[in-house]
């Protein structure tokens, strides 16, 4: 056997709990931008097409509707409101997944390593409680997806947290010096 020219242990740095249908919904850059737009406010296909155009992504309204159908099938958006306009129904959509158009510091793990380690220790207690909960055991009778389901529960809990007024108030509070 030949000696390896390069070898290192690669650590998992991020976890995303998506299935293959959701990843297909995310496979197009225009759909990612649509999700980012819809995470701020409900919009209809015409408004999305205009917003994409303003961002330099030219898409016809019919193409936007196709992207919306794909995102809806993937469970990444839902109809939030329907309005009757001149005898037709106009649908407004909202994202069920928050997409951020932000850049993390280049070396987040290095710069926030201690904070990440401390948070991981606290999260371990929460994950242990999830695994020990009878309601969790009922989710995966044959124990084939325990890790995925536990992380999905944690992810859904984070999403619910992000919707709470207390969390939004926390984000609105000025940073302490």
Image: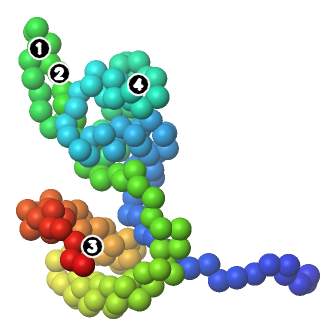
For mark 4, give the secondary structure.
helix
Residue 82 appears at what percent x and percent y? 11, 27
Would you name the residue on which mark 3 appears?
154
Would you name the residue on which mark 2 appears?
90
Task: Measure the C-alpha gap from mark 1 to mark 4.
Answer: 23 Å
For mark 3, give the secondary structure.
helix
Do the residues bearing badges 1 and 2 touch, measured as CB atoms within 8 Å?
yes
Residue 81 appears at what percent x and percent y? 12, 33
Any part of residue 151 in sight? yes
* Mark 3 or mark 1: whose residue is earlier in sequence: 1
* Mark 4 or mark 3: whose residue is earlier in sequence: 4
The residue drawn where x is 47% and y is 68% is 105
Task: Measure the C-alpha gap from mark 3 to mark 2.
Answer: 35 Å
Would you name the residue on which mark 1 appears?
85
Q: How crowded is the residue under tag 4: few (<14 C-alpha within 10 Å), some, or many (20+)?
A: few
Tell me, for residue 53, which label it has, or none.
4
Residue 16 appears at what percent x and percent y? 41, 64
* Mark 3 or mark 2: whose residue is earlier in sequence: 2
Image position of 61 with respect to 30: above or below: above
Q: Quadrant of residue 156?
A: bottom left
Tell me, for residue 95, which label it has, or none.
none
Task: Measure the C-alpha gap from mark 4 to mark 2.
Answer: 20 Å
For mark 1, give the secondary structure.
strand
Q: Which mark is in front, 4 or 2? A: 4
- Taking depth in this image into account, of 17 and 58 the one nearest to the observer is 58
The residue drawn where x is 56% and y is 79% is 11
For mark 2, give the secondary structure.
strand
């Amino acid at each position: 056997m030949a000696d390896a020219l390069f070898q290192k242990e690669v650590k998992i740095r991020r976890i995303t709990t998506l299935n293959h249908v959701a990843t297909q919904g995310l496979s197009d850059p225009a759909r990612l931008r649509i999700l980012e737009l819809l995470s701020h406010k409900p919009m209809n296909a015409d408004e999305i097409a205009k917003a994409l155009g303003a961002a330099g992504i030219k898409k016809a309204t019919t193409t936007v509707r196709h992207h919306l159908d794909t995102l809806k099938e993937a469970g990444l958006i839902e109809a939030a409101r329907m309005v009757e306009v001149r005898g037709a129904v106009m649908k407004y959509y909202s994202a069920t997944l928050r997409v951020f158009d932000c850049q993390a510091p280049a070396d987040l793990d290095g710069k926030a390593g201690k904070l990440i380690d401390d948070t991981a220790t606290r999260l371990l207690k929460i994950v242990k409680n999830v695994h020990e909960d009878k309601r969790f055991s009922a989710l995966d009778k044959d124990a084939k997806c325990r890790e995925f389901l536990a992380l999905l529960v944690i992810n859904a809990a984070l999403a619910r947290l992000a919707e709470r007024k207390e969390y939004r108030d926390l984000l609105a509070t000025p940073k302490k010096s």
